[in-house]
Image: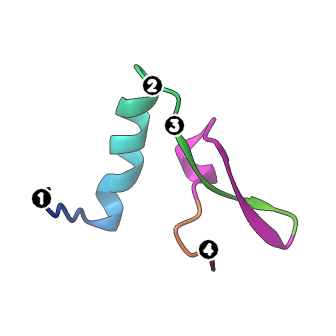
Amino acid sequence: MSLWVMDKGAVAPFVTNMMGDYRVVGPVAKGVQYAFDQIENPADLRLDYDT
């Protein structure tokens, strides 16, 4: 498997493109916590979540 790193600014366009063909799931804010849920808007994706 290859490692692939993208700039933070490339994440939203990538997610938008993926949403056209796939169900995209990622970390979203749920109150003061985070949960993995379907992404409806790339802006909802939280890359600063804690595990």
Q: Residue at x 35, y 31 (%)?
A: 17
Query: What SS does tag 3 mark?
Result: loop
- Residue located beneath label 1 in the image: 2
Task: Give the Cα distance between marks 3 and 1.
Answer: 21 Å
Q: Is residue 21 above or below residue 35?
A: above
Residue type at tag 4? Tyr
**Residues drawn in magenta:** 32-45
Q: In this view, does 32 lie above or below 26?
A: below
- Residue located beneath label 2 in the image: 22
Residue type at tag 1? Ser
Residue extending furthest toward the bottom: 50
Mark before the other along the chain sequence, 3 or 4? 3
Q: With 36 as the anchor, is 3 left or right in this view?
A: left
Q: With 29 as the anchor, is 25 left or right in this view?
A: left
- Residue located beneath label 4 in the image: 49
Question: Which percent across, then down, holds residue 28?
Answer: 68, 56
Residue type at tag 3? Val
Considering the image in quadrants, where does the N terminus appear? bottom left
Here the colouring is rainbow
- Contact, mark 4 vs mark 2 (Cβ under 8 Å): no
- Contact, mark 4 vs mark 1 (Cβ under 8 Å): no
Q: Residue at x 35, y 43 (%)?
A: 13
Residue 38 inside the magenta-drawn segment: yes
- Residue located beneath label 3 in the image: 24
